Image (tube, rainbow, N blue to C red):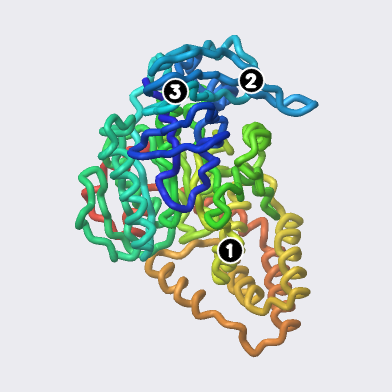
Amino acid sequence: MRLYEIRFSSEGKTEESELYLKSSGPISIVDNRLSLEKGTQISFGTYFNSFSVRKWKKYTSVSDLEIRVEGKGEFSVRIVGAKLAKAGIVYDVLLERECQGNFNEKINLNVIDCDLLYPEIIAKKANCEIYEVGYHSGFGENEARLAVVFCTFKREDFIKENLKNLKSGILEHRNSLLRNRIQTYVIDNGRTLNNENIPDFIRVIPNPNLGGAGGFTRGIIEVLSNSSFSHILLLDDDIKFSITSLEIVYSFISAIKEDYAEHFIGGGLIDLEIPYLQYERNASWNGVSTRINGSNLDLRITENLIRNEIEDETQGLYAGWWFCCLPVKSVKKLGFPLPFFLKGDDVEYSLRNESKILTVNGIAAWHEAFPKKTRKWNYYYQIRNYLFLSVLRFENYDRTDLLKFSLYRLIKNTFTRNHLALEYTRKALYDFQTGELPESSEAQLLQKSVLALKPGTDSLIKLGLECLSLTFRIWKIFPELSTKIRKNADRYYRFPFWSEYLNLDNKKDSATDMGH
């Protein structure tokens, strides 16, 4: 089975070429064929095209790796292993062959010691062309079938470009690994898309605007109503992605060891404006603040690629839903996400899965970095939802943690004179003290009221004191409030709640077969 194809360039116009290949001389790419002048050397020791040896060995049944090169002319192929030592990167040439047209060699992963592995090609004569390069393996694959779920709200330009990428990279590709192995669902919260020019393997489903949580959960319900899928890949609408990432995900879940079969596979977030800079690999929540892992890594640098494969501590670890693959068996075990509207649903769900998170180089999406993207009104949901999820996911979350959470933000927003943030905080604390999340009609009305919030006539001091008063009111009732939140949470995980919340009909009853 081919694990994934080595692509010579990105599918879009904004992505950084050095995330695909590096060249010592002039090259040209026409119709997916790579032409090299005599003496030109290219390296696939890059973010998307290197092979993460340690991750594949640890988490999958892949033990033998076959590297294939198809081309024309005389060239040599060198298979390079790279690992990080105290003195820096150590490179090792694992094998090298002179070729006339094609190259096909196997590597036993169990006998090599490296972090990354990749081919390099050197043109020996003029008119050298490379048609195809890829990683293959003879492992006994699982019957993986992947459902891709986009959640969108009036982002037609982004979503249409992403669907176009799927069509050209899968349907129109001459031998796509993913053909007949994925189905795509677009959950249209804005009800603005139509089915014109939509390929057969893509379904557009109108949905009420209940935020990302409502959209992704609707997608999960649709997938569960079809028993053939093994995994669900959640994708944000305003991303750009490489088909390579989908291929790596698919091959990884097809070969994953049983011990890791319930892990989520999280994609990194690469800054859309600086398309070689990783903003986040994943992140951790400790009940008070977030730690971003793998931030500000230049993915063009080989050393950073190796550092990016270092395992993170699992305490509070979560994967963002701009690109996250969920095993269906995990979803059936966990139940549905919380109706948070937006912010924190991915955090809570990862923590509910005991932070079983995997990341692998090459699995990522380009996305606007969150400090640039976040709208001011998101702050309301951030306060309310992160308090909810902290109570639910940290067994010993107590009054002291509540004070740390609230006072840290009150002091920060008061000293920065952020009136609007204090307005959102006041409303979030007021709503949190009820210990309940709104029903669907209430959620839509709530969203309108949050959008309508503006800096009022109240002084900064008055706002701060009201937030402080609410904090101590919650502090007084916190043990009882926490008990209520934990007791009521189970109903949110079940299909009957979501059926009513999303106003579904009885045709989706098959999704109730989740052990909940």
Give the mark nearer the N terminus: 3 vs 1: 3
Dot 2 and dot 1 residues touching (CB under 8 Å): no
Report, in whole angstroms, how far the alpha carbon at label 2 lies from the one at label 1: 37 Å
Quarter location, residue 238: bottom left
Residue in view at x 33 percent, y 47 percent: 221
Give the mark nearer the N terminus: 2 vs 1: 2
Residue in view at x 45 percent, y 16 percent: 66
User: Mark 2 packing: few (<14 Cα in 10 Å), some, or many (20+)?
Assistant: some
Residue 386, percent across and down? Answer: 60, 57
Q: Could you say whether the residue bearing mark 3 is in a helix, strand or loop?
A: strand
Q: Could you say whether the residue bearing mark 2 is in a helix, strand or loop?
A: loop
Residue in view at x 58 percent, y 63 percent: 372
Which quadrant of the figure contains the C terminus? Answer: top left
As drawn, the label of residue 135 is 3
Q: Nearer the viewer, residue 297 or 499?
A: 297
Residue 106, percent across and down? Answer: 47, 12
User: Mark 3 packing: few (<14 Cα in 10 Å), some, or many (20+)?
Assistant: many
Q: Could you say whether the residue bearing mark 1 is in a helix, strand or loop?
A: helix
Q: Amino acid at mark 2?
A: Cys
As drawn, the label of residue 372 is 1
Eye-nearest disc, 3 or 1? 3
As drawn, the label of residue 200 is none
Which residue carries the number 2 mark? 114
Q: Amino acid at mark 3?
A: Tyr
Report, in whole angstroms, how far the alpha carbon at label 2 lies from the one at label 3: 17 Å
Which quadrant of the figure contains the N terminus? Answer: top left
